[in-house]
Amino acid sequence: MLEMQGVDTAYDGVPMLRGVDLVVRRGELVCLLGPNGAGKTTTFRTLVGLVRPTAGSVRLMGHDVTRLGTERIAGLGVGLVPEARRLFPQLTVRENLFLGHRATGRSEGFEAALDEIARLFPRLKERLSQPARTLSGGEQAMVALGRALIGDPELLIMDEPSLGLSPKLVHQYFETIERIHRSGKTLLLVEQNAEMGLGIADRGYVLAKGRVVASGTAADLLARDVARQAYFAAPLEG
């Protein structure tokens, strides 16, 4: 479904990612972990076409997307949930969801898709006519996820979904993500909260200073406590 091979990136000549290799297979939930400044959001931005690699390649569902823009990538069947949700605050919930549907290139089927999102997030059904800026943080997170899902993507990529949510809402949100995965969706979760991310993932990667420093099954990474070691710059073992 997704493969990064030997990817380097740079901002204004400053290296950000260094030789990143990452694979997500169909049906998996893979978690990309790391502390602040590790390169997680740069990885997300590279995958969705906002940052161009200086070396290496990115493939999505068999297509080389290394040089494609975000709109083309979304049209391949990729749902995107950016950091901090990035809703259109003045638009209603319905309008935000409609834009997510249109991003897939589809012109029909919005009402049926909207019904599916309302079943997943019943609270949003009561908020469809409200401007997104009037919603709580948890409700905005639902809209952002609904906007990514409404086009029925084959692959869902989420950047820091727990950011700005209370611990209670984080647990509820991750339960929803896990439920979406169990329904058959393939997901890449870019996340700082190692315990929550690995708690629902099949496999994981740990980034530190722009490099993948560990990878394996979620159970293995939790048992080795590699995320904590990376976060506190302790030497990795095994």
Image: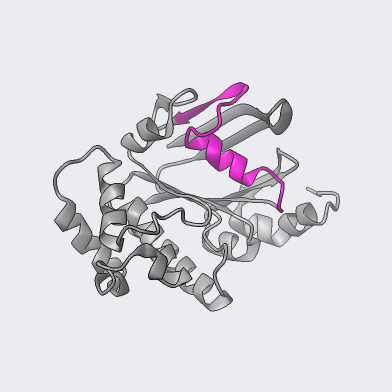
Rendering quarter of residue 112:
bottom left
How far across and how far down the image is residue 57, in percent?
Answer: 54, 24
- Reply above or below: 161 against 208: below
Residue nearer the viewer, 219 or 58 = 58
Q: Residue at x 51, y 36 (%)?
A: 47
How far across and how far down the image is residue 169, in percent?
Answer: 50, 74
- Reply above or below: 124 against 217: below
Q: Residue at x 25, y 67 (%)?
A: 129
**Side (left or right) of 49 relative to 40:** left
Toward the front, the furthest residue is 90
How far across and how far down the image is residue 102, in percent?
Answer: 25, 43
Residue nearer the viewer, 115 or 86 = 86
**Side (left or right) of 13 relative to 115:** right
Residue 238 on the magenta segment: no
- Whether residue 151 appears in this view of the structure is no
Rendering quarter of residue 17:
top right
Q: Which residues are magenta?
A: 35-59
- Whether residue 121 appears in this view of the structure is yes
**Side (left or right) of 161 relative to 209:** left
Tell me the colour scheme of the image. Answer: one colour
Residue 53 on the magenta segment: yes
Q: Could you tell me which quadrant the N terminus lies in?
A: top left
Q: Residue at x 41, y 55 (%)?
A: 87
Across the whole image, how many numbered discs are drawn on residues?
A: 0
Q: Residue at x 60, y 50 (%)?
A: 204
**Side (left or right) of 63 relative to 163:** left
How far across and how far down the image is residue 67, in percent?
Answer: 48, 22
